[in-house]
Each structure stands twice: as C-alpha cells, then as structure tokens.
Amino acid sequence: MVVALNAIEKLSHIRSVHVATYQAASGAGAAGMEELERQCGEISRGEKATVGKFPHQLAMNVIPQVDVFTDNDYTKEEMKMYNETRKIMHSDIRVSATCVRVPVMRAHSEAVWLETERPVSLEEARRAFREEEGIVFVEEEADGTRCYPMPLDAAGTDPVFVGRLRKDLADDNGLAFWIVADQIKKGAALNAVQIALYLIDRDRKRG
C-alpha cells in the first residue's frame, strides 16, 4: 500500500487512509497455504473441513480477522498497518484498516480510500501511478474493455499493481483505488534486495 500512497503523497499530502485488505492464505506461511488446499480437498469430497491454522474454515469463506485482537478492537495486523505506514512515510497520516483473510492461495489485495490536502485530479493520479517505480498501473484496453489487477495474475511477480482508480464520492479531496501484489515477493524477498541495493548505491555516492 505504501508504494501506491507514495506516488500520491508526491502530489499532495495524504491526511487519511481507509483500507480493507483481502489477504491470501500465504500471509500465514506454508501452513496457511497447506490448510486452504487441504480444506478445499475435504469439502470437494463432502468431508468436514479441518481447522487449525486459522480461527475458522477459510475455504469457501472469508475471515475478518488477521492476527489477534488488541484492546481497541483492532487486530495486530490492522494496527501494524497504522503504525508502519506512518513510520515508513515519516508522516502524520491517519490509517484505519480492516484486514480480512480470503481463500486465495497467494497475493494480497487492498481497497483503498484516501483523503489529500487538496483535490488531486484523476489525470494527475494516473500520471503519478504510471511514473512511480515499482508500480504497474492497470488501465482499460483500447477497445474499452475494463481491466483491473487480480491476485491470480499478480502471484509470482514483483510489481505493485494499481487499478480501479476513481474519485471518492464521499470526499471532495478523496481518491479510491484497488491494489494487488504478491506479498511474498514484494513484501518480503524483493523488498530486502531493494533495500540492500539502495544502501549500496547510497554508500557508493557518498564515496
């Protein structure tokens, strides 16, 4: 999410973000993926799904809980989105998240609504997403066919995919869009490599 937010932050300071995440089983590691696969098999055979890694059956279901609940009724995952977004962006941005586990094997999705200090036009936002390193902005085809990112297509790839860009009908300074990325690659492995390369380049330039 922060990769996409950064593109808009360069245009106007982001005051607040509301986000609903749709997090794949792989976010819970290999055990989460194995449980989803096993449950799908059990259900297809007419058997009762075995629940272990997740608090409820994930196959054919969605679970509006990722990690444990905290004292303010947000989960640790939701509070992590609040705290880490502010930390990474060095910003006073306010973040309110609802994190949901979905029966997808790999790649997380997010529906984002944000408010900027000034109205940002759709054309400005499109240009920012197109030009931001690490983002693939998914637009409609030349024949008008609507296209948007999906976890099935993002799995195993490096970029952050952004689509469904539109003005927020509830906020004159708001934008809404949809994000998909393979959190294993972009959120973990690739990020580590990119940070290392950044540090090496920074030290080289310092001489």
Image: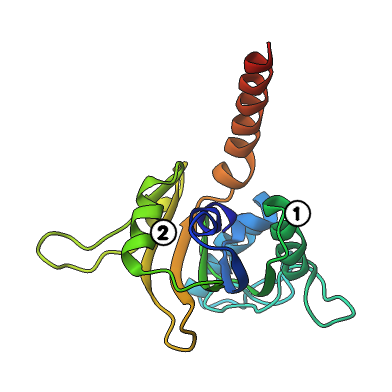
Q: CA distance from mark 1 to mark 2?
A: 22 Å
Disc 2 on helix, strand or loop? strand
Could you say which is closer to the camera, residue 40 or residue 25?
A: 25
Q: Residue furthest bottom?
A: 170
Q: Residue furthest top?
A: 207
Discs 1, 2 touching: Cβ within 8 Å: no
Label 2 neighbour load within 10 Å: few <14, some 14-19, many 20+: many
Q: Position of residue 175 (x, y in %)?
A: 45, 73
| The quadrant where residue 42 appears | bottom right
Q: Position of residue 163 (x, y in %)?
A: 37, 63
What residue is drawn where x is 31% and y is 63%?
123
Instruction: Give the mark nearest the N terminus, 1 or 2.
Output: 1
Tag 2: residue type? Val
| The quadrant where residue 94 appears | bottom right
Residue 102 image label? none
Q: List the residue tagged with mark 1.
A: 87
What residue is drawn where x is 68% and y is 71%?
95
Specify whether residue 149 is in view.
Answer: no
Q: Is residue 55 left or right of residue 153?
A: right
Q: Residue furthest left?
A: 143
Disc 1 on helix, strand or loop? helix
What residue is drawn where x is 62% and y is 28%?
198
Q: Is residue 70 left or right of residue 205?
A: right
For the C terminus, the image quarter is: top right
Q: List the residue tagged with mark 2.
A: 162
Could you say which is closer to the camera, residue 116 or residue 25?
A: 116
Q: Position of residue 38 (x, y in %)?
A: 59, 62
- 180 up-or-down from 167: above or below: above
Tag 1: residue type? Lys
